[in-house]
Image (cartoon, rainbow, N blue to C red):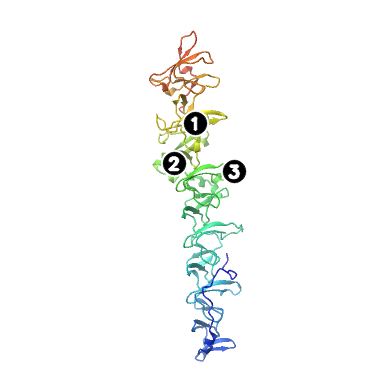
Amino acid sequence: MKIYRTKNTFIILTAAIMILDTSMVSRAAGWTETEYGWHYEENGEYIKSAWKKGEKGYYYLGESGKLSTAAWISHGDEKYYVDSDGLRVKNTWINTERWDDFSDKNQYWYYFDRNGEMMTGKQQIGDKKYFFSDTGEMLTGWITYTDGEAAELTDEISSNYTYYCLEDGTRASGWLKLAPPSDEENTGAEYWYNFRSDGKIRRNTTVTIGDYEYCFDTEGRMMDGWVYNTDDEYVKVDDQTDRALLDKYNEDASRYIYCGAENVGVIQKDIWLSIVPPGLNGDPDEDECWYYFNKKGKITTASKSSVSLATQSNASRTTEVRSVDTKGKYGLSGGDDDLTYVQLVTIKDEQYLFNSKGTLVDGLIYIYNKDGSFPLKEGYYYFGSKSAKSTGKVTLKNDGTEYEYYFSKKRENGYSQGQGVSGIVNGTLYYKGLAVTAEEEMKYKLVYIPEFSGDHGTGLFLVDENGKVKTGGLTSESETGYRYRIIKNTNNSSSGFRIYRVEKGMEDEELSEEDADLKLDISDPELIL
């Protein structure tokens, strides 16, 4: 970033250097040419250190009375320039050496107004804006302008009154990809910056430009990837950001926004993205996670500290869940880290669960609802296809074995939509969503479910290896050599059947819960550590 010099060809002078009409001067009264140059005589003495008006403008007579040419003139508090014919220039650009440092042999661009005075600070020339130093040099590159003074910027950007001037000196606006003003390590890195219509840099803010919203850090650099809002500033979060590794940057994940891949910079909104988590997990080798960014660009989280959740309606949509330890069983993952705080969110008619970090919680889980405030009743649920809540029949695999589940298709019969049902559905017996079947070596299994027993039911069911419930009549002979006779409950067959053991030559024996091969009574699922 250098003050504009002679080799630059971008400046077009707005007025040609005016040429002194020496023939006019020689004939005019008072002008005298000597071996030392032109003088103006008045009352028998040369005029010295003063301006003299001629037909074409003003001329300056120096301390000796000699006409000054191609020179800087300091008169009072102002600086002027006279051309090779001694005429004071005005409304024009001049490329010349500095007036305040004769040891500097470089040439710089200066502009002189209609009175011929050298311009400083911020100026409009024609339809363009320029900045000039306090000694009048036109400035290019990174500029600060405060209290009416413009100066080159060589440190980090820390002021909203920061500008950038192109090689021809014009103040820039819009997008520019530039090296920062301070690059002590000379890395050559460049970043995208955006300047307002008045030339001021956009910094530490989010702003809509065209059809998209962007985020800029405190130094005005367009941000990409994960960004965290600390209230005071926007911080880029990656595995190279020391501050991102502190706990305070992980307290409230709702403060994160995502500004797209490298050099994209657009704040992502109303979109699903599978990306590497921010902060401590921001390792490219880590698995990607699904996030949903709402219409404001905020990730959906279940963070208790989130301002976005600080409403009664949202608070009622948060609860705790555990993952099922093994598919085909009821035990839950019991470690402290396995208890997850979640929020239920509906997106385009589908329901999802998000944890406090904003990542999707999916798979076979158990939802707690101890105080009854959560929209879904306590029980087993499956968030599977694209992590949305599943309903109806679902087949899950574990170590090559398939297990059948059934989740309520709608809110009915005391179940929430998506909750694992207990009872007979399409001829199959389910308990907490899992189909109950006889083992391969067994032809039938007698199952007792206490919650179905009582005045109107026995709680007893006879199922085969496919989970189909025997609802009446006499079965074929089992592997033990006897049969079963099933009598429907006239009040409600879904609450169990009267089941008898039939052996040849013996009186039929009505079976009870004590005869059951399997008792299913899970009011509080076991935690598997």
370 left or right, relative to 156: left
Q: Is residue 469 above or below residue 145?
A: above
Which image quarter: residue 487?
Answer: top left
Inter-mark Cα distance, 3 to 1 = 32 Å
**Residue 328 in sight in this render:** no
Inter-mark Cα distance, 2 to 3 = 32 Å
As helix, strand or loop, the secondary structure at mark 1 comes to strand
| Residue 138 placement (x, y as % from top left) | 54, 69
In the rendering, which numbered label is found on residue 394?
Answer: 1
Give the amino acid type for the residue marked by disc 3 in the picture: Asp
Q: Earlier in the sequence, mark 1 or mark 2?
A: 2
**Are the residues at dot 3 and dot 1 in contact (C-beta closer than 8 Å)?**
no
Instruction: Identify which residue is drawn at 50% across, 40% down.
Output: 360
Q: Which of marks 3 and 1 is nearer the N terminus?
A: 3
Inter-mark Cα distance, 1 to 2 = 22 Å
Question: How crowded is the residue under tag 2: few (<14 C-alpha within 10 Å), some, or many (20+)?
Answer: few
Q: Is residue 272 above or below residue 159?
A: above
Comparing 280 with 58, the one in front is: 58
Query: For mark 2, what is the residue?
Result: 348
In the rendering, which numbered label is found on residue 285?
Answer: 3
**Are the residues at dot 2 and dot 3 in contact (C-beta closer than 8 Å)?**
no
| Residue 470 placement (x, y as % from top left) | 46, 19
Q: Earlier in the sequence, mark 2 or mark 3?
A: 3
Give the amino acid type for the residue marked by disc 2 in the picture: Lys
Give the amino acid type for the residue marked by disc 1 in the picture: Val
Which image quarter: residue 154?
Answer: bottom right
As helix, strand or loop, the secondary structure at mark 3 comes to loop
Question: How crowded is the residue under tag 3: few (<14 C-alpha within 10 Å), some, or many (20+)?
Answer: few
